[in-house]
Image: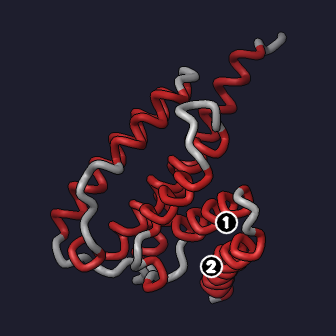
Amino acid sequence: MTVKPTTTKWHTIGQLLTGLVLGGALTFGGLALAGKLKPPGEPEALVALAQTVEASDRKVDVMLERGDVSGGIAALESLREIPWPSRERGGDAAVQLRHDAYGRLLRLRLDHPQVDAKTGKQLLELADEGLGREWEQLDPNPFTARLLALRGEVLEGLGRDDDALLLYEQALDMNRDLLDEVIQEVGR
């Protein structure tokens, strides 16, 4: 029996998407259980935000499965227009959700520069907008680490290698801290 290439392709994409969703859920769940996600001042703000981001993510997934990168980027761009709750109002999880959404948007823009092309300066502004001012106050998390690394990638593209290296090191430090936490938990 031979497997059709398209069947294998969809199976692989399905596995990837399942892994991404499961990884995100396990990360959030693990951070919550470890007490790393501080409870927000207004839980309803976080719930509404999480629902909005989840619906947008599903829409983007469908568009990307259909090969509509432009539509996926447009859907993520629409998240830039929503009022993101502050850290005080939505807690660390709200900031991490923003980092996740902006990281996904920036990754798509970097991987598909021909779609609604943006300059390096515009991509840097996007990364800065996504990071916000409070990112340094957060405990290490994969979403902030990823957005920092993506900002470094943009800076590298702009020829600012020293600035890029600093961000890559910050992202790597965050990921090391996360790995150390996991190793310590496994060792208990």
Q: Nearer the viewer, residue 127 or 56?
A: 127
Kindly identify the residue that appears in the image at 57 percent across and 31 percent down.
115
Give, as a three-letter code, the residue at label 1: Gly
Q: Position of residue 17 (x, y in %)?
A: 57, 40
Q: Residue at x 34, y 41 (%)?
A: 78
Q: In this rendered view, identify the residue nearer to me: 133 or 37.
A: 133
The residue at 42%/34% (across/down) is 74
Q: Position of residue 80 (x, y in %)?
A: 35, 50
* Quadrant where the N terminus is found in the figure: top right
**Picture layout, residue 9 above or below residue 18:** above
**146 versus 184 height, above or below:** above
Q: What amino acid is found at the position of numbered circle 2 in the picture? A: Met
Quadrant occupied by the C terminus: bottom right
Image height of 165 relative to 125, above or below = below
Q: Secondary structure at mark 2?
A: helix
Q: Which mark is residue 174?
A: 2
Color style of the picture: secondary structure
Mark 1 sits on what residue? 152
Q: Tell me if I can see residue 60 in this picture.
A: yes
Residue drawn where x is 46% and y is 74% of the image = 31
Q: Is residue 139 left or right of residue 111?
A: left
Q: Label 2 crowding class (10 Å Cα cut-off): few <14, some 14-19, many 20+?
A: many
Q: Can residue 186 be seen by looking at this rendering? A: no
Is residue 155 toward the left or the right of residue 22 in the image? right
Cα separation, mark 1 vs mark 2, equals 14 Å
Circle 1 crowding by C-alpha within 10 Å: few under 14, some 14–19, many from 20: many
Q: Residue 187: image x %, image y %?
A: 68, 86
